[in-house]
Amino acid sequence: MVKKSYTLEKTFAYILVVGGIIGFIAAFILTVDKFNLLKDPSIDLNCNINPILSCGSVMKTAEASTFGFANSLLGIMGFAVVTTIGMAMLAGATFKRWFWRGLQVGTIFGIGFVHYLIFKSIFHIGALCPYCMVVWTVMIPIFIYTTIYNIRMGHIPVHARLKKVMAFVERHHGDVIVFWYAIIIAIIINQFWYYWKTLF
């Protein structure tokens, strides 16, 4: 049991580090592009691939600054914290229960905000930001594994009715993540099929 918990902790730490670094880089690039766009609204960003995959189209919307500043700044701060936590765990650091609960709250906010932006991008803006999608991609496993880790380690209580659900998620975590991705991809394909079909 101790060995299993240690393996879970180490795996979780690597997920935080790798996911945090990838998310940080994507958020940093988005921030730089946002500044460039503010300086020159006519600039053609390197992530403007086609009418659908276009960072510029998304950055010019109000949703790109939901709280009055660029969303990517939240990403820079959040993913920097996530990466630091993962590195600290690999170095042998331990944290109090309140700390892990704080991380859980943060990841719940993150996954909720990401899905708000997914909905807005697909159904309202009608364009997808490639770097934003990188953030979406890493946020899902960070949320899943943070939740699994916190429940396994007893940092957050679980109602008896949810224990079977969480046990299933823990056993099939990889399948859950793939299925989650598949749903988002299917929605994107369906919503923008009018464009995708012109590529064939």
Image: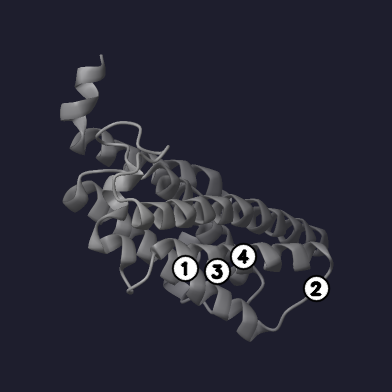
> In the rendered image, which residue does mark 1 sit on?
74
Which quadrant of the structure image shows residue 39?
bottom left
**Front-lying residue, 24 or 46:** 46
Query: CB under 8 Å between callouts 2 and 1?
Result: no
Q: Is residue 138 above or below residue 175?
A: below
**In this picture, residue 113 sits left or right of residue 120:** right
Q: Residue at x 27, y 39 (%)?
A: 188
Query: CB under 8 Å between callouts 3 and 1?
Result: yes
What is the three-letter code of the residue carrying label 1?
A: Leu
**In this picture, residue 157 sits left or right of residue 190:** right
> In the rendered image, which residue does mark 2 sit on?
93
Outermost residue toward the top?
200
Q: Position of residue 157 (x, y in %)?
A: 54, 79
Q: Residue at x 62, y 85 (%)?
A: 98
Q: Position of residue 144 (x, y in %)?
A: 52, 58
Which quadrant of the structure image shows residue 161?
bottom left
Q: Residues within 10 Å of mark 2 (few under 14, many from 20)?
A: few
Label 4 vs 1, first from the N-terminus: 1
Q: Secondary structure at mark 3?
A: helix
**Front-lying residue, 81 or 172:** 81
State how far apart marks 3 and 1 are (Cα): 5 Å
What is the three-letter code of the residue carrying label 4?
A: Ala
User: Which disc is residue 77 wearing?
Assistant: 3
State how far apart marks 4 and 1 are (Cα): 10 Å
Q: Is residue 131 above or below residue 71?
A: above
User: Which disc is residue 80 wearing?
Assistant: 4
Q: Residue at x 35, y 39 (%)?
A: 44
Q: Residues within 10 Å of mark 1 (few under 14, many from 20)?
A: some
What is the three-letter code of the residue carrying label 2?
A: Ala
